[in-house]
Amino acid sequence: MALKITVIGTGYLGATHAAAMAELGFEVLGLDVVPEKIEMLQRGEVPMYEPGLEELLRKHVAGIEGSTGRLRFTMDWAEVGAFGDIHFVCVNTPQKHGEYACDMSYVDAAFETLAPHLRGPALVVGKSTVPVGSAERLAARLAELSPAGEDAELAWNPEFLREGFAVKDTLHPDRIVVGVRSERAEKLLREVYVTPVAEGTPFVVTDFPTAELVKTSANSFLATKISFINAMAEVCEAAGGDVAKLAEAIGHDERIGKKFLRAGIGFGGGCLPKDIRAFMARAGELGADQALTFLREIDSINMRRRGQMVEMAREALWGGSFLGKRVAVLGASFKPDSDDVRDSPALNVAGQIHLQGGQVTVYDPKAMENARRLFPTLGYAGSAVEAVRGADVVLHLTEWREFRELDPAVLGQVAGAQVILDGRNALDPEAWRRAGWTYRAMGRPTA
Ligand code: UDX
């Protein structure tokens, strides 16, 4: 009999995982505690912007014309407990307010609520990013609270998807990592990850702590790469070098690689910043804080770049104050192809300039609603052209394709002053300069 799967939590991770499991042919039941989310998902609508996800949902959600009907959603924990052979826990682990540590309350609540409903053999699979040692603790809790006792087993299966590429990364991951304690758990997870996910994909089997650490160390490495190139950008700025050329040149060395070496205003989002902080906090608890002191520097280089972008804007306005100056901000999401504004470097820069008296007008292709909710006092425009109209300086802060395709000549006609600062090193300097703009980018010489 085919395995039945439940997915607890329907954010970027859970909604995508549920749809992907249905795509692989399983019967899937997704659970969330937010009624509006469940209602949307049941209609085949996605509560966030994620390319390709809506199509995949509509292909499988029961009740939608022409769907396979393999995917349903509920708020009923008892139904979930009775339905699933395998339960994937995909709830989020945000940063605790005012602390580095991550907030485990959603994960803990998911386990505590699910466990009493597990009456027969079941595999609960944690996918959330958690502090190392959590799986060990949750396994004990599961055995204690579940009527199935030892038959309710735990596995840890970290997820590496990137927002904006969630569907692709879930159906075609670089690797599958499973932390297991029994052959049965490994066998079940191998049954879950069938072709096309499994095809040619390395399947790494580990113990619990290693599986948890793979995720946090991978994100730490990525954050380190970005802050490394941003540190080089600072040196380039001081020495008159060009960080874009430097990144290209060092990237030819396969040991270094080209990816994640784009200098600019740094990383944000719901993962990298909070994951490196939670990792430091956990290492401290384990007495291994010295091993991760470098991450403190990675974090501060990253945060410093935002302030340096503000200074660059001030210099572009002849070093004076922002008072009475109009600043156009292109981009609000923490990265392109996403409407996620959590810890967005773009909005942070916009907010700093606004606090210093600048009249900021933001435009983003998809994140306007989320940005307005988080920063209601900023100005917003309905298009890039409207944002730039009358601006004394234009800041390019999230590298959407739409911004790369803008015609600098058209913007030149509406701008107050033709000065553009590229906080993502993603625009074509020559095209902008040819159209009469002063183009400046972080870590590159002024022409
Ligand atoms: C990240 C990891 O990539 C993913 O594997 C993990 O599962 C979750 O965290 P995500 O947060 O979706 O994914 O975004 P990512 O594409 O990694 O970008 C993170 C941030 O780094 C963005 O703000 C992006 O603009 C920035 N970035 C990325 C750079 O500043 N320079 C780069 O070269 C690459």
Image (tube, rainbow, N blue to C red):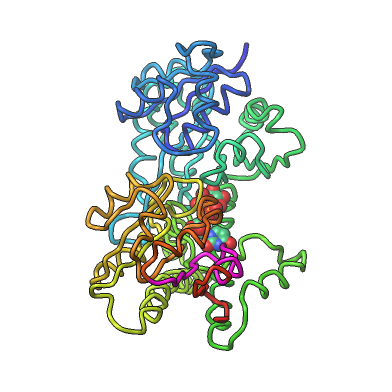
Is 32 left, or right, of 27 in this rendering?
left
Residue closer to the observer: 403 or 57? 403
Along the viewing direction, whichever of 211 and 216 lies nearer the viewer: 216
Image quarter (top left, top right, bottom left or bottom right) of the C terminus: bottom right
What residue appears at the point 27 percent right and 80 percent down from the top-left corner? 321
**In-image side of 221 versus 374 (left or right):** right
Give the number of callouts. 0
Instruction: Specify start and end residues of the magenta stretch as a single range.
Output: 417-433
Q: Is residue 439 above or below residue 127?
A: below
Quarter of the rendering containing residue 68: top right
Instruction: Confirm whether residue 428 shows in the render.
Output: yes
Relative to 59, 375 lies left or right: left
Seen in the picture, residue 239 relative to 362 is either above or below; the reply is below
Q: Quadrant of the N terminus?
A: top right
Q: Horizontal and vertical percent for residue 380? A: 30, 53
Please say whether residue 430 is one of the residues in the magenta stretch: yes
Residue 443, image x, y percentages: 55, 77
Along the viewing direction, whichever of 259 and 112 lies nearer the viewer = 259
The answer to whether any part of residue 216 appears in the image is no
Left or right of residue 5: residue 45: left
> How far from the left and from the top, in percent, is residue 361?
32, 59
Residue 186 in magenta?
A: no
Residue extending farthest to the front is 413
Determine the residue positioned at 42% across, 77% down.
312
Indicate the position of residue 125 as horizontal and vertical percent values. 52, 34
